């Protein structure tokens, strides 16, 4: 089944203009790889309209080289050129760029899902699905080794908690300068992004009407378009995993090829 027709129509609507650039100067902080990404992309996408999140936002200290890295992303996001915004800045480390953006997308999806949690309940969504063709069962390989069938809110709770644990793990996402990323970092990042995509897919297929009612469709479309451009740029999600939203992806990206 294709995404709701409203999703495709809304995809063509321009997002609201971005707010004014952040005025607050970065506060001194301990050396860190990543900056507080939520303050940048979230400000661009949502302004101050909503502060509700599903899980606590992932806050990372400002004041480092990575603050400048995210300022670069802010500038290109503000220009509306999402293709340029996702490109690896010259001279930067790919692992670091993927880490910064993975935290950013976690925060974006966290806020987007937080706006519709009242509509995603055990009763309305007894299974985690993306339309009638796609159903997801949860397993993390550690606490739950055998995939279990569960409701969408339970699945997303498992998923976001698991992602949060990965982002907080210093052996996977090192925050101190000089500490290298592990050899399996890119594999972990790909799994995180693959699973975050499923939240987008569930929202589009099962909850797009409430998104329209809340007037959040432009924000959802801009966030998802940014996400798709990023994973396409670095081949981070297998095309088969994107199938539940393939028609929407083609619609969103066709004008930027």
Image (tube, grey):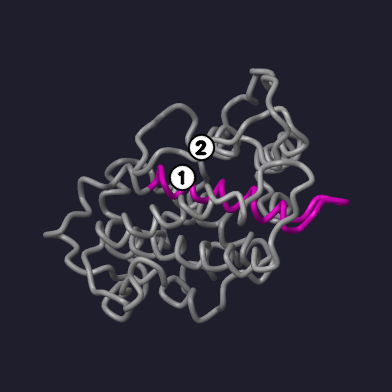
Q: Is residue 193 left or right of residue 141?
A: right
Q: What x and y, as percent, mark residue 60?
A: 59, 36
In the picture of the structure, the residue carrying the numbered disc 2 is 16
First in sequence, mark 1 or 2: give its number. 2
3D distance between C-alphas at marks 1 and 2 = 8 Å
Image quadrant in which the C terminus is located: bottom right
For label 1, count other residues whose C-alpha is less than 10 Å away and answer few (under 14), some (14-19) or many (20+). Answer: many
Which residue range is magenta in the image? Answer: 87-112
Dominant secondary structure of the residues highlighted in magenta in the image: helix
State the image quarter where residue 189 is shown. Answer: bottom right
Q: Nearer the viewer, residue 15 or 73?
A: 73
Q: What x and y, as percent, mark residue 50?
A: 38, 32
Image quadrant in which the N terminus is located: bottom left
Q: Is residue 82 magenta?
A: no
User: Does 10 appear above or below 8?
Assistant: above
Q: Which residue is at the far right?
A: 91
Identify the secondary structure beneath mark 1: helix
Q: Is residue 135 left or right of residue 171?
A: left
Q: Nearer the viewer, residue 124 or 35?
A: 35
Q: Nearer the viewer, residue 16 or 143?
A: 143
Q: Which residue is at the far left?
A: 123
**Residue placed at 74% from the left, 49% from the top?**
179
Tag 1 near tag 2, CB within 8 Å: yes
Q: Which mark lies nearer to you, 1 or 2? A: 1
State the image quarter where residue 176 is shown. Answer: top right
User: Does 76 appear above or below 173?
Assistant: above
In the picture of the structure, the residue carrying the numbered disc 1 is 219
Identify the secondary structure beneath mark 2: loop
Q: Is residue 255 left or right of residue 166?
A: right
Q: What x and y, as percent, mark residue 80?
A: 65, 44
């Amino acid at each position: 089944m294709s995404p709701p027709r409203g999703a495709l129509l809304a995809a063509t609507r321009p997002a609201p203009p971005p707010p004014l650039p952040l005025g607050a100067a970065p506060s001194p902080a301990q050396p860190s790889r990543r900056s507080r990404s939520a303050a940048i992309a979230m400000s661009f996408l949502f302004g101050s309209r909503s502060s509700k999140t599903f899980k606590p936002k992932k806050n990372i200290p400002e004041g480092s080289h990575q603050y400048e890295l995210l300022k670069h992303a802010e500038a290109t996001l503000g220009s509306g050129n999402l293709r340029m915004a996702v490109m690896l800045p010259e001279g930067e480390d790919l692992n670091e760029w993927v880490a910064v953006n993975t935290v950013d997308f976690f925060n974006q999806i966290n806020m987007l899902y937080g706006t519709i949690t009242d509509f995603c309940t055990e009763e309305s969504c007894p299974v985690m699905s993306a339309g009638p063709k796609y159903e997801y069962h949860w397993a993390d390989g550690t606490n739950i080794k055998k995939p279990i069938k569960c409701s969408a809110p339970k699945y997303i709770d498992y998923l976001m908690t698991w992602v949060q644990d990965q982002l907080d793990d210093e052996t996977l996402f090192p925050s101190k300068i000089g500490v290298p990323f592990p050899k399996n970092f890119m594999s972990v990042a790909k799994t995180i992004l693959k699973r975050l995509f499923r939240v987008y897919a569930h929202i589009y297929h099962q909850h797009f009407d409430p998104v329209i009612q809340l007037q959040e469709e432009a924000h959802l479309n801009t966030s998802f378009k940014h996400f798709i451009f990023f994973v396409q740029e670095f081949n981070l999600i297998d095309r088969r995993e994107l199938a539940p939203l393939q028609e929407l992806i083609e619609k969103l990206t066709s004008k930027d090829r």
